[in-house]
Image: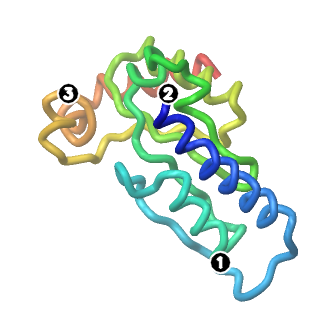
Amino acid sequence: MEQKDKMAPKDTCFRQVMKTVYNAKPCGIELDRYSVAPMLEITNKYWRFFARLLTRRATLYTEMIHQDCVLNHKDGYLKVLDYEPCESKLVLQLGGNDPEKLARCAVLAEEMGYDEVNLNVGCPSSRVQDGQFGACLMASPERVAQCMHSMQQAV
């Protein structure tokens, strides 16, 4: 409980700053193209806030979120998928290999207002490969096709 209390003022302040930036008039140089690969513990809400300061034209990506984290998070999917309106255009990157679970995640992402859903088929980390998703999915194009088809049919 004590840790939540410490985080609340910081998060509240962050939300206020994000609202201010979202409502501000653009200033500075707008970049035509700006993209950064989704990276665990890097492309979090703070990074996306910084990127949005650079340009409103950027398409931003979440960190990769595993299908089971979205579906089984102790605080619920709303906590995991939460974002600020100024982050749009925002892409949710999912990790996983279960077509049914990924389809359910895609439905939740659509309900939350995400602009796109991206399936991670490129992360080379050993932890990700042990879970049979990420780059190791390149060896299973049929599985990737099943996952993509399932998500497309769901949304």
- Mark 2 sits on what residue? 1
- The residue drawn where x is 38% and y is 19% is 68
| Of the pair 56 and 13, the residue shown nearer to us | 13
Viewer-nearest residue: 95 or 21 = 21
Picture quadrant of residue 37: bottom left
Q: Which residue of the protein is positioned furthest toward the front in this rendering?
A: 2
What residue is shown at x 79% (from left), y 57% (from top)? 19
Closer to the eye: label 2 or 1? 2
x%, y% of residue 3?
Answer: 46, 37
Q: Does residue 152 lie above or below 120 as drawn? A: above
Name the amino acid, label 3: Gln
Which of the two discs, 1 and 3, labels the residue nearer the N terminus? 1
Q: Secondary structure at mark 1?
A: loop
Nearer mark to the viewer, of 2 and 3: 2
User: Where is residue 88 drawn, in percent x and y?
Assistant: 70, 52
Residue wearing tag 1 = 32
Residue type for callout 2: Met
